[in-house]
Each structure stands twice: as C-alpha cells, then as structure tokens.
Image (cartoon, coloured by chain):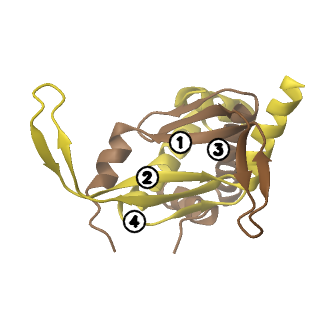
C-alpha cells in the first residue's frame, strides 16, 4: 500500500487541530508550490528530506525498444531528487520486505 | 525555494489558517513521507511523482585516505520518479525559455 495525498490529509487531521478542508488545501498546495518553483527553474530544498534539482540534458541517440528504430532523444530539462543525510540514514537501516 | 520559504508562501495563501499550523503541517507532511520510506512504503502523489526504495547490493569500498578495503553491507536508497505533469511542466517551461 502506497502513501497518498489522502493519507497525508488524515495524518494532518490526527496530528494538528485543523479542519479537513484546510488540511486538504495545505497538502494540495504543498505539492503544487514545489511544482511551480521547479517549473520556474528553481531548485527546492527541504531540509531533513532532500533536494529537488533540475538538470539540463543534451540530445542523445535513442532507440525505439519495440522496433529497434533509431530516434534521437531530444534535449530536455529533468527533475532529480537527492535525498538528505537524515532521510538516507533513516532508510539505510530498512531490512527489506 | 527552501522549507521556510515554502511555509511563508503557504501561510500567505492561507491567511485564515494560523502560521503555526501551516508550519506544523509542512513538517508533518515531510515527517510522514520520511517515515513511510523508512519502513519500505512507497509514496504516490498524482501529478507530482512517486518515491520508492532502490536496493544497493553489498560491495567492497575503499577508505579514500588510506586506500584500505572496507566491506559495505547492502542498503536501500530513496528514489524519486517525477510524474507526467511535473515532467511536462518543467520541460515545456524550459523549452519556451530556450526558443
């Protein structure tokens, strides 16, 4: 089972004394504002969690995996995530399912 | 944008919510996302992306100072895969810029 926005809204209701409409609004806006900042070309740094950075990729040769046909992968800007020390340390000790 | 700037933006957009609550909400969201990953649970946020764990097998590393071999055990590392909306928005804003 994956954690979703609905689960995060529930957590806010349990942990804080705010109403459901506000909790939903804050969770939606949390992700919307990160998207907007990245779209505007700025990195996002959430201390304790990690950094969302932008990388500009040059065009490179690619292949259609189905047909084997060569088609260039166009130049593009992509989002990368670099987990912070705290998150890395928390996850490293996970023993696996 | 930093976490405190994100809190400021959300507080400005939600003046009916106490700033303390906005701050607590941002910290709670981040904390629960970290907790989920630390027990191996995936995170799926539609339009934003998904977080999961990737396995790293054990390997022999080296102490960069002394050159000694060190056995490193297997571990998991967090991985983020941007969702379609985020990918498209970031890339098309940039393409318009570079046109």
Mark 1 belongs to chain: A
Q: Secondary structure at mark 3?
A: helix
Residue B46: image location, x then y, percent: 70, 60
- Residue B98 is marked as none
Asked if disc 4 and disc 3 are in contact, CB closer than 8 Å, the reply is: no
Nearer the observer: mark 3 or 1; the answer is: 1
Q: Which chain is yellow?
A: B
Asked if disc 1 and disc 4 are in contact, CB closer than 8 Å, the reply is: no
Nearer the observer: mark 2 or 4; the answer is: 2
Gap in Å between the C-alphas at discs 1 and 4?
18 Å
Asked if disc 1 and disc 2 are in contact, CB closer than 8 Å, the reply is: yes
- Residue A30 is marked as 3
Nearer the observer: mark 3 or 2; the answer is: 2
- Residue A81 is marked as 1
The correct choice, above or below, for A73 with respect to B14 in the image is below
**Dot 1, how many residues are within 10 Å of its Cα: few (below 14), some (14-19), or many (20+)?**
many
Q: Residue furthest front?
A: A69
Location of the C terminus of chain A (image quadrant): bottom left
Gap in Å between the C-alphas at discs 4 and 3?
23 Å
Residue A60: image location, x then y, percent: 70, 41
Q: Which residue is mark 2?
A: B78
- Residue B40 is marked as 4
Asked if disc 3 and disc 2 are in contact, CB closer than 8 Å, the reply is: no
Gap in Å between the C-alphas at discs 3 and 2?
20 Å
């Amino acid at each position: 089972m994956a954690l979703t926005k609905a689960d995060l809204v529930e957590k806010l209701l349990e942990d804080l004394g705010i109403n459901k409409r506000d909790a939903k609004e804050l969770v939606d806006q949390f992700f919307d504002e990160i998207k907007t900042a990245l779209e505007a070309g700025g990195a996002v740094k959430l201390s304790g969690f990690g950094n969302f950075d932008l990388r500009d990729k040059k065009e490179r040769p690619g292949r259609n995996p189905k047909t084997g046909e060569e088609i260039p992968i166009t130049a593009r800007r992509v989002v990368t995530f670099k987990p912070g020390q705290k998150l890395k340390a928390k996850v490293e000790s996970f023993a696996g399912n | 944008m930093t976490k405190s700037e994100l809190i400021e933006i959300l507080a400005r957009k939600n003046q009916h919510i106490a700033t303390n609550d906005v701050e607590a909400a941002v910290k709670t969201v981040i904390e629960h996302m970290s907790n989920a990953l630390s027990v191996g649970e995936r995170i799926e946020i539609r339009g934003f992306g998904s977080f999961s764990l990737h396995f790293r097998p054990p390997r022999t590393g080296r102490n960069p100072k002394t050159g000694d071999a060190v056995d490193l055990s297997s571990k998991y590392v967090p991985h983020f895969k941007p969702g379609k909306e985020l990918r498209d928005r970031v890339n098309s804003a940039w393409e318009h810029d570079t046109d």
